[in-house]
Image (cartoon, rainbow, N blue to C red):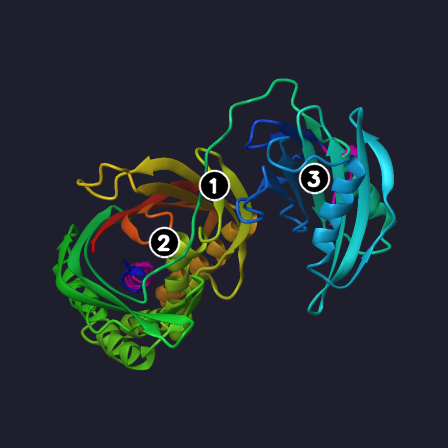
Amino acid sequence: MIRPFLKATFVLISTGLFMWTAMGSTNARTLYSDDGISELNVPEHWVLSPHISATASLRTTDPRTNASLVVNSYLPDEIKPMSLARMAEKLSRALLEGLDKGRLSPPRKLTIQGRPAIEYEITGRVGDMRLSYLSTVVEGRTAQHHVIAWPVAEGNKAARAAQRELVATFKESTKQRSVRERIDLSFNWPRKAESTFDFHSKQTRRGQTTEIRMNGYTRVRALGDNQLLISTQVADFSMLPGGQNEARDAYLHNLLQQAMSGVPDYVVSTDGAFVGVENIDTYLGRLEQSLFKALPGDDVAMQQKVKTLLRSLVSEATLTQAIQEEWNNQVANWAGGSYARGERYVYAAQYQAAALGSGAFPMMVTQRLLGRAPCNGGDLAQSCVLLEQVSRVSDPAFSQAMHAFVSKTVKDMAGDKAGEVNIAVDRAEFVKTVTVLTRPESLLPYETATSKVTTVVVSDQGQTETTLDTEASRTRYAY
């Protein structure tokens, strides 16, 4: 249960040391509903979405615009028999009830893939946000289907036409498929809890391997009505250095010991969102003293350059950002989703790294719920689920930022010989895989594992070298 702060601090220190698209204009692909009944063609960049309309059998989103479409299917034994016209009005008015100043258009009769359908346009507001829905009910052979697409700005005829073109591809599958099990994930931590943890990591950078082991406990308590305060205490810590530089290893060991002691608390909301870090000023002050005290080496000028680099990496903003990333990977990114077992859910996100400044880089994230699993050895009911998230950053902008950082750092360290430095980063890629063994009804973790692989291709004076930095860690929790 929860050591994102410990892991984030270790990662930072280690790093420092060293609108809708028209269907006719793009390729399309077919998405299939989880209930095995229906299917729909979408532009190739559209993705399945686990976090919208948990009850819908098909859920898809355009990551470029956040436009979405869902399908709800109603079998004859699930609803009271009624005509297509009555069904379409009833379902559309249900959408209207959730809007302020809502307006329902007259019904529009049409045919979709040879089946009768009725469409309504619905507009209104939620707070200051204006929403517009296209609500279409299709009379299928085996069920009635409610296809909902949103949002499109009112009066945007081109966007509305593209939206209708998307809905027009909906149909019942020729052959019914098996129902795919879906599992809902909810953040529901207790307002008071305690766990012990055991942590082990192995990191290889530039051929040098460092192993870290530690254990301790974490406590959770309520902070007011809507927040939880999470406190972590390390009981035992050990480091096994793999390098040949004793002075460096001793410095790093002392530094990490300081980083792991007196860890600040952090706060999350009862909805699972990260709020912030508590008591960080004192911690950063002590950590900074450890960073700059007894730096290895006798070159005073070089030590000052290292201090400048470390000071830019270890700050309240960078630590908070790293802690929030760990929390999101393990908890927040999953909370509120409904996942079909084995399905790949892909979405675009942004990646930031303290060493590369304030810029953000495109990141592709893939999520999967791999299946049920025992929470521990005595759990015969397999009460947990195994979640996997893979984040990949390989955009050219990321390589350019890495080039700027590496070039500047090397030149700064070279001093008077900076003019002789002609190093270039040709390509950079970062892949992070996080697996979490957790209870679906609470998202309390029992085990987390993280793998990070950073690949950098560097050229210097006609010579090219590929460096591969890796880190693997595992944490087990007992409640």
Asked which secondary structure carries label 2, the reply is loop
Residue at horizontal 25%, vertical 44%?
375
Segment tinted magenta in the rendering: 8-26
**Which disc number belongs to residue 339?**
1
Q: Percent from the top left, x then y, of residue 315?
A: 37, 73
Q: Residues within 10 Å of mark 3 (few under 14, many from 20)?
A: many
Quadrant containing the N terminus in the rendered view: bottom left
**Which of 333/100 is in front?**
100
Q: Percent from the top left, x then y, of residue 314?
A: 35, 70
> Amino acid under label 2?
Ser
| Sequence-first disc among 2 and 3 | 3
**Which disc number belongs to residue 146?**
3
| Sequence-first disc among 2 and 1 | 1
> Amino acid under label 3?
His
Q: Percent from the top left, x then y, of residue 347?
A: 55, 46
Asked which secondary structure carries label 3, the reply is strand
**Which disc number belongs to residue 442?**
2
